[in-house]
């Protein structure tokens, strides 16, 4: 497969995530769109690592091509920690204002 | 058209279609379920790229743990299509236009590149657990240990934020 196919697929998924963040007003859906963007980037990192596995530098070092996949692993670790804290924040917000509409968050200043 | 390309197209259509369904469905529970379908399609892509460890971890961590957490919170709040916040048509149009413009610009920029770089499909051992484990515990052992501290702080943070207030503020 050509690397361009993977770049365009990741780009489409990332753009859907961006549009979701801009369009939706539900805080949980916005959070899910952020997860979708993270996954699009993960897919691109794995595709690039497999692209490098074909290069000549990969023959010299055994772990050269798997570095990007370690990065994806750490992105997943950070995303899991982020989701637990973010959902706690959304639950607290729901408990205080009884809605998940992000437009209500501008009342924080009063 | 080879079998690899057919599988790639099938998984891509599945991922993009489910992602579109996710951002357009009214009911938040349906959105969570469509996002799980997207994650399964991305795991299929990982298997196609022979990144077996990441495919399994993606299913266990994302489709398993994280999305169940989302579903749990959605059901805890009793969200459904009726409680969905009202939307502004004009803002929606602006959002879709700006996102589409970003996509068009990057796609046209990528199409300018005429370098043919191939991706290794269904071969190579860089995604196997043995190679990844050797790399993780030899070269990346310090970030691995630091991530355990991150998990501890996230756990404490979630408990502290989610805890009910002891003092009732009634004014």
Image (cartoon, coloured by chain):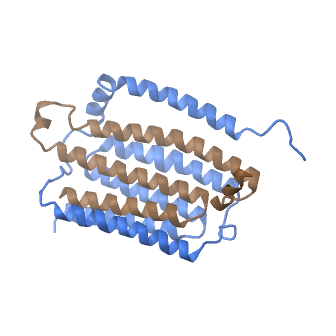
Chain colours: A brown, B blue
Looking at the image, residue B153 sits to the left or right of residue B116; the answer is: right
- Seen at 16% across and 69% down, the residue is B1
- From what the image shows, is residue A39 above or below residue A11? above
Q: Position of residue A94 (x, y in %)?
A: 71, 53
Q: Position of residue B14 (x, y in %)?
A: 37, 65
Q: Nearer the viewer, residue A70 or A101?
A: A101
- Seen at 38% across and 23% down, the residue is B142
- Seen at 46% across and 65% down, the residue is A19
Seen as rendered, the residue at the extreme front is A110
Q: Position of residue A43 (x, y in %)?
A: 33, 51
Seen as rendered, the residue at the extreme right is B171
Q: How many marks?
A: 0
Looking at the image, residue B38 sits to the left or right of residue B53; the answer is: right
Q: Nearer the viewer, residue A78 or B3?
A: A78
- From what the image shows, is residue B148 above or below residue B105? above
Q: Quadrant of residue A24?
A: bottom right
Q: Nearer the viewer, residue B109 or A64?
A: B109
Q: Position of residue A41 (x, y in %)?
A: 36, 50
Q: Quadrant of residue A11?
A: bottom left
Residue B34 in sight in this render:
yes
Q: Quadrant of residue B19?
A: bottom left
Looking at the image, residue A31 sits to the left or right of residue B7; the answer is: right
- Seen at 45% across and 68% down, the residue is B20
- From what the image shows, is residue B31 above or below residue B121? below
Residue A1 in sight in this render:
no
Looking at the image, residue B157 sits to the left or right of residue B120; the answer is: right
Seen as rendered, the residue at the extreme left is A56
- From what the image shows, is residue B141 above or below residue B113? above
Q: Quadrant of the N terminus of chain A?
A: bottom left
């Amino acid at each position: 497969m050509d690397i361009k196919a993977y770049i365009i697929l990741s780009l489409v998924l990332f753009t859907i995530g961006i549009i979701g963040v801009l369009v939706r007003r539900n805080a949980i859906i916005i959070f899910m769109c952020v997860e979708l963007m993270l996954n699009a980037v993960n897919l691109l990192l794995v595709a690039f690592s497999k692209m490098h596995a074909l290069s000549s530098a990969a023959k010299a070092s055994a772990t050269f091509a798997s570095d990007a996949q370690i990065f994806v692993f750490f992105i997943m670790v950070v995303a899991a920690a982020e989701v637990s804290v973010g959902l706690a924040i959304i639950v607290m917000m729901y408990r205080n204002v009884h809605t998940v509409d992000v437009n209500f968050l501008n009342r924080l200043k009063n | 058209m080879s079998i690899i390309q057919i599988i790639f197209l099938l998984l891509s259509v599945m991922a993009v279609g489910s992602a579109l369904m996710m951002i357009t469905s009214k009911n938040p529970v349906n959105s969570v379920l469509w996002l799980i379908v997207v994650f399964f399609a991305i795991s299929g892509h990982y298997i196609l790229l022979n990144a077996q460890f990441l495919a399994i971890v993606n299913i266990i961590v994302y489709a398993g743990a994280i999305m169940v957490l989302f579903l749990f919170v959605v059901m805890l709040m009793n969200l459904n299509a009726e409680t969905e916040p009202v939307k502004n048509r004009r803002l929606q149009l602006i959002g879709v236009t700006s996102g589409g413009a970003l996509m068009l610009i990057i796609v046209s920029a990528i199409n300018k590149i005429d370098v043919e770089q191939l991706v290794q499909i269904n071969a190579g051992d860089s995604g196997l657990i043995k190679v990844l484990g050797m790399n993780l515990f030899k070269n990346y052992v310090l970030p691995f240990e630091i991530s355990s501290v991150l998990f501890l702080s996230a756990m404490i943070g979630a408990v502290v934020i989610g805890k009910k207030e002891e003092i009732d503020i009634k004014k």
